[in-house]
Each structure stands twice: as structure tokens, then as C-alpha cells.
Image (cartoon, grey):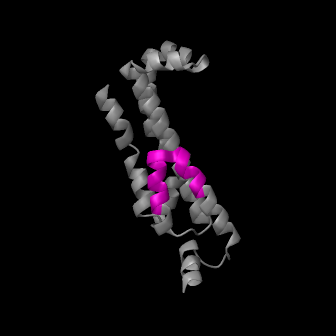
Amino acid sequence: MSTLFDLVFYVVVPFWALMIFAPTWRHTRTIISSPWIVAPALVIWAIVTVPVLGTFWSMVSSPSLAVITEAAADPAILTALWAQIIAWDLFLGRWVYLDSRERDIHPLLMGPILLGTIMLSPIVFPVYLLVRGVAGRASSGSSLVARADSVTA
């Protein structure tokens, strides 16, 4: 189970690397545009969840702190929850990346935001929405970082 727990992160790392380190490479947008990039994490989720589907279903259909705490003591359930979180974070990061490219938000600003999305998406996603709002109010002719540079010059 430990191997699958670790593997779920490693199967999404290439997609995060493309978005963070090669955001303007011509193939990055094509690859990241596919919602199927979350499939490797979801395959691991399915492999882990099928054998414990009854317990997993009970946990999600009647959630309570006590039920989830008890279920999370099972390494398979915890690994399934981890895979679900990793898949969701990648799906959210994918949306943030694609949206930022559409809005021409500079990759140097987006790199830390995407990295933060991996680590703490509930905190960083609202930060991105604020950045997105600022980018929407700024002139459409240049990137957000270039606009910020012109304001300080």
C-alpha cells in the first residue's frame, strides 16, 4: 500500500513540471488541455478503492468525523483519499494553468501559484482568483508582470 501511496504523487509530477517549468512550451498547453491527465491518479484510486469499496462508500455516504477517523486508520482508505486529493489538486491546477495562459498572466508569477496549489490549494486558489481579478482589470495588451513593472518604473 505504501508504494501506491507514493506512486500516486509521482504519476502527476510530470504534468505539474510542465505547467511550472515549461508553461510556454508549445506542447504543454496541448498536454495539459486534456482532462485525462488526472487518469493515472484515478487509476491508482480505483485499484486501491475497489477492494474496500464497501467501507469507502459507508464513509462518504454517511460522513462524520468519527467514521472518517476510523476509516482513515486503514492504509487502503487513506491511500484512496490521498489519490482523490492528488487528482483533484491536479484538476484544479490544470484549470488555473489554462486560465492563466488565456489571461496572459506571466509564468514567473504563476510558478509559485501553481506550486502553492500542489501544497495548499484551499489557500492558494483564492489567491489565484485575486490575481486573476487584477489581471482582468489591467490592460489587455501585456502580461501582468510587465504591467506591474511599468507601474513601478
> In the image, what residue occupies the spot 54% across and 18% down?
59
Q: Position of residue 131 (x, y in %)?
A: 60, 62
In which quadrant will I find the C terminus? Answer: bottom right
Q: Position of residue 3 (x, y in %)?
A: 29, 31
Outermost front residue: 152
> In the image, what residue occupies the spot 54% across and 74% down?
145
Let me know if residue 118 is in the magenta part.
yes
**In the image, is residue 49 above or below residue 104?**
above
Let me know if residue 89 is in the magenta part.
no
**In the image, is residue 63 above or below residue 117?**
above
Quarter assignment of residue 138: bottom right
Outermost right residue: 137
Quarter assignment of residue 43: top left
User: Can residue 24 be seen here?
Assistant: no
> In the image, what residue occupies the spot 54% across and 57% down?
97
Magenta highlight range = 111-128
Outermost left residue: 3
> In the image, what residue occupies the spot 45% across and 61% down?
111
**In the image, is residue 117 above or below residue 105?**
above
User: Can residue 82 be seen here?
Assistant: yes
In which quadrant will I find the N terminus? Answer: top left
Predominant SS of the magenta segment: helix
Q: Is 70 or 55 nearer to us in this picture?
A: 70
Q: Position of residue 152 (x, y in %)?
A: 55, 82
**In the image, is residue 21 above or below residue 36?**
below
Report the number of discs.
Answer: 0
